[in-house]
Amino acid sequence: MDDARLPTGKYIVPALAQGLAALSLFSRDRVRLTAPDIAQELGLPRTSVFRMLHTLEAMGFVRREEDERHFRLGSALLGSGFAYLASLDFIEVAQSVLQNLRDKLDMSVHMAIRDGRDIVYVSRYAAQTTVRSSVTIGTRFPAHATIMGRMLLLDLSDFGLRELFPFEPFEKYSDQTPLTLAALTALLSGDRERGYAATQSFFERGVSSVAAPVRNSSGAIAAAINVTSVDAYVDPALMEGRVKDAVLDAATEITRWISGDAGAPGRAG
């Protein structure tokens, strides 16, 4: 990207356009950038980029690394439209917990965030010995029809749900898909009481899953995790027992880390 690709026009605010363009340079493959990197990419003077980064750092949109040269996306993005990129921090924090959960249960493990009416997979750890989930990072599924989607909708009020799902019937993916707001609301009510959900073939035939929400420091749902077993019958007693307990423990541990109540691996605390 260079300055020729930055938007121009009578009503364009150049500094805002440049700041947003700088943030868009960060990605899963480029989680760390220096000011010279950004200046070169955008075709901007280094002094302008240094001032821009200082402003973004003061507002929490980027954070400076210990070497004082590299920058990463900051925590302020967690509550904005940059949620997918900002989620990189807690994806990193959750890695060891999700891997341990995979190894403990020998089931595929995933984490997802919500983007409107969809969920987006941001972490995946495939089972080592059983049939693996084919989901990849970046996969999008409808929130109303998936178990992790239900976890990511738990915080919404009835009004919020009506705003998000204004049209009925909802698209059907299985015999268990809720097709109306009333049906979805009933499922969410039960999920809230339990604090998790366990399903067999809810979204795809032959897929068993248990999911739970992960919350941030303000108590809001930031992500959801699940375990899945593909093309294999899982005893409901096992799902509602050992599997459910392990998923809830993992969700609680990730929540503690991202809310600052415990030290993550390799960190003091």
Image (cartoon, grey):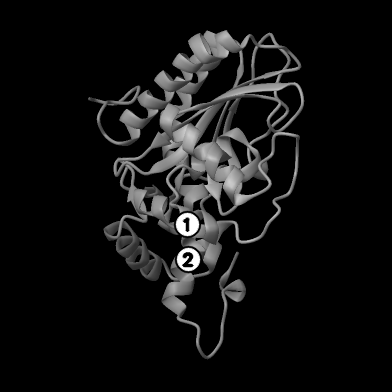
The residue closer to the viewer here, 266 or 133, is: 133
**For the view shown, which residue lies furthest in the bottom direction?**
10
Q: Is residue 96 above or below residue 178?
A: above
Quarter of the N terminus within the rendering: bottom right
For image coordinates 54% across by 40% down, the residue present is: 186
For image coordinates 60% across by 56% down, the residue present is: 165
Q: Residues within 10 Å of mark 1 (few under 14, many from 20)?
A: few
Residue 169 screen position, x and y as percent: 71, 53
The type of residue carrying mark 1 is Gly
Residue 127 screen position, x and y as percent: 64, 15
Q: Residues within 10 Å of mark 2 (few under 14, many from 20)?
A: few
Q: Which mark is residue 239?
A: none
The residue closer to the viewer here, 86 or 135, is: 135
Mark 2 — residue? 20
Quadrant of res 105? top right
The answer for how far apart the CA atoms under marks 1 and 2 are is: 28 Å
Query: In this image, 43 relative to 53: left or right?
Result: right
Element under disc 2: helix
Element under disc 1: helix
Q: Is residue 41 above or below residue 211?
A: below
For image coordinates 24% across by 25% down, the residue present is: 268
Quadrant of res 255? top left
**Residue 250 visible in this rendered orientation of the protein:** yes
Closer to viewer: mark 1 or mark 2: 1
Query: In this image, 253 relative to 39: left or right?
Result: left
Q: Which mark is residue 160?
A: 1
Quarter of the C terminus within the rendering: top left
The residue closer to the viewer here, 54 or 263, is: 263
